[in-house]
Amino acid sequence: YTTTTKGDGTYRLEGLPNATYEVTASAPRHTSVTKTGIVVRPGQETTGVDFQLPGEPGTIAGQVVDAQTNQGIAGALVEVISGTTTIASATTDAQGNFTIPNIPVGVYTVQATAPNYKPASVTGVQVQTAATTRVTLALSMAQPGSISGRVTRADGTPVGGVTVEVVQPATGEVVARGVTDAQFTVVGGYSRNYLIPNVPLGTYTVRVKAPGYTPTPTERTGVVVQEATETQNINFVLRAQYTFARGIQLISIPYDYTGTGITINNLLGTDKIITWETDPNFTDPMTGYRGGRYVRFPVPPADAFYLGRGYFVRFDQSTDFTQPGTPAPFDQPFPLILDKPGWWLIGAPFPFKVDWGRTRVTNRATGQTLTLREASLQNWMSDTLFALNQFATGYLTSVFMEPFKGYWVYVQAPQGVILSIDNTPTRQATVSGQPSRSKLALADGRLSLGDDGWLVPIKLVRDGQVLSTIQIGVSPQANDSLDGLDLLSPPSLRHWIPDWVTFGSVVRIGRSETLLYADVRAPSAKPQIWDLAIETSSSNERLTISWDKINERAPSDVRLVLVDLDTGEARYMRTTNGYTFALKDGMKRLRLIAERRVGSGLRIVGMKPEVNRGGKLLVRFTLTETAEVECKLMTLTGRLISVVQPRRLMAAGEQRIFWDKRSANASLPKGLYLFEVQAYGERGEQVRAIMPLRW
């Protein structure tokens, strides 16, 4: 059914059967429109089926020109905008011409943008039915902007030499680039380490090209550059596989570079490197240490990085590792040959952490292979790894081999050993099923100490920073001479590091004294005594030695006492956690005493007075246990006359207290007085004995 509209646009269709219809209206040079679901019912007229036919789309064409030269601008973006919506766009040709077809009839804004030009627009552009509307847009040259920011490590230090690219997101074209500096530039309180000038106006994506790093974020999108304006704080954080901190570090590299031509300087940016050459016939000229010597770059083996070897390196600034080489095979343990007795500097052979306790040891002389713990008990080698502490003032123990870190280890077997370093990545040492004291010892890096022994780490602390650590303990597997459970201190760095701290347990070997990192004794009914030596480059500073978990680490029937040999001051270690002291000429000697409690507890017995030949009063008494003791003279009513002996620690056994029969201010008249002895035990118990004195 069809009909034609009248002159006023109205229409009427008659004679339609009852049904539901689609109705389409069309006209020349207009777009047809269809309406559906039009219902015709018997005897009724369906009205209101009206149409608005849009005209056929038109075209906007024209040219984008330079406002000063009137020359066409190639590559300009021309957009047709209705309200805030871009409905069509085109890019100008080499002469600056453009054509945008199929624009619905209406009124629009036409906008043109081009690199290095200010945007320009024409409003009120009328598009007629099937007609072409011509527009000319003149763009004025714009001053370019710039982009700046910071490219840093996770610790906030700047990374130099990184390329920063400014990318046109539509085409992927790099429109500008710059390179970062290794130092910040501060302008008006704003810091940056890159500035990219002459960036055309526009909206861009900014990214960094930094091989060996993982950037966060990977790119910055929607970066707007405005005329003559610096777009700031386009920042990135780079994470290298590993970052070496500034200062002296004990390191290793878990990659091989044979045949690559990559040098130590290429990898680390420094050749301030030394390592240790192990040989019983050598004496190190710098430290006087026998059994090896430090060698410096480029003397082998300090001429290159070798898998499994450790090195001391001085870094003048934070240094990123970004050039991995060839790793050791991951599918098998790493064999490391230590072919002589003595100290060895070794390194982690894998780029992942492994459990040192899973290492197996082969004796080169016999071919026998044991676990690390068994090898230690057989005196083939020590069970302990030594790493450099974070302040480079001393050593600490480790139960892991971590990538990029180096370690000291001591070999005793006359022909050396072969280590099979486990290739299983791990996060936690193997301690399951071990008794509690063994777990604590394992956490302190000792595999060979069973639960029938005990071990106490003693830390040397300055301003909350642990400078060095030693270990004292008792084990049935030990003896009181040097054995496999004792650990010598690794070769010192005192001649290379001015702040180096010497801290150890003093033992006599033959006619000379040496320092032990770990001094483990045999059980004894007599008190065990450790003399501790401390030496630093600072003459009169105050330091603290500290300890913790004594009640967990040592059996409950062992009394531990610390004595300052210079002042005589002493303290129970179970009821305190540290002792602060002043160095004298950079040195200090302390004594640690361990004794077993015996008998029925703390008592004061056999107290009696005597007058010696000099006319002084002598009071004798016996302590059944070591205790802190204070002695007082009082009147019969209990008024204090004099503190004859200030509170101090006294050992079990007979004690003698002298008094010159004077009070604090004058001689005492003859008469009857009371003499009191008060003793304080380690567990807080107190006992008192009083006797009358007459003279």
Image: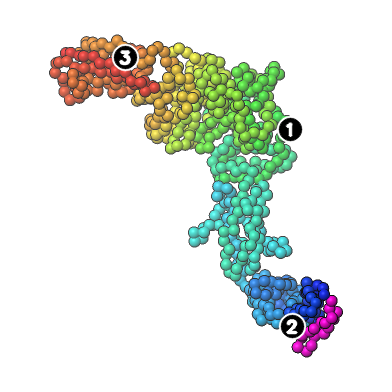
Residue located farthest toward the bottom when viewing the structure as drawn: 7
- In the visual, does 648 lie left or right of 55? left
Residue mark closest to the camera, 3 vs 2: 2
Q: Secondary structure at mark 1?
A: loop
Task: Look at label 3 and name its amino acid.
Answer: Ile
**Residue identifier under label 3:** 604
Q: Which mark is residue 128?
A: 2
Q: Secondary structure at mark 3?
A: strand
Queried whether the magenta region covers residue 11, the answer comes back as: yes
Question: Range of the magenta residues?
Answer: 1-17
Q: Earlier in the sequence, mark 3 or mark 1?
A: 1
Residue mark closest to the camera, 2 vs 1: 2
Task: Look at label 2 and name its amino acid.
Answer: Gln
**Going 35% across and 23% down the picture, which residue do you hit?**
568
Residue located farthest toward the front when viewing the structure as drawn: 43
Q: Quadrant of residue 332?
A: top right
Task: Look at label 1 and name its amino acid.
Answer: Asp
**Going 55% across and 47% down the picture, which residue do you hit?**
155
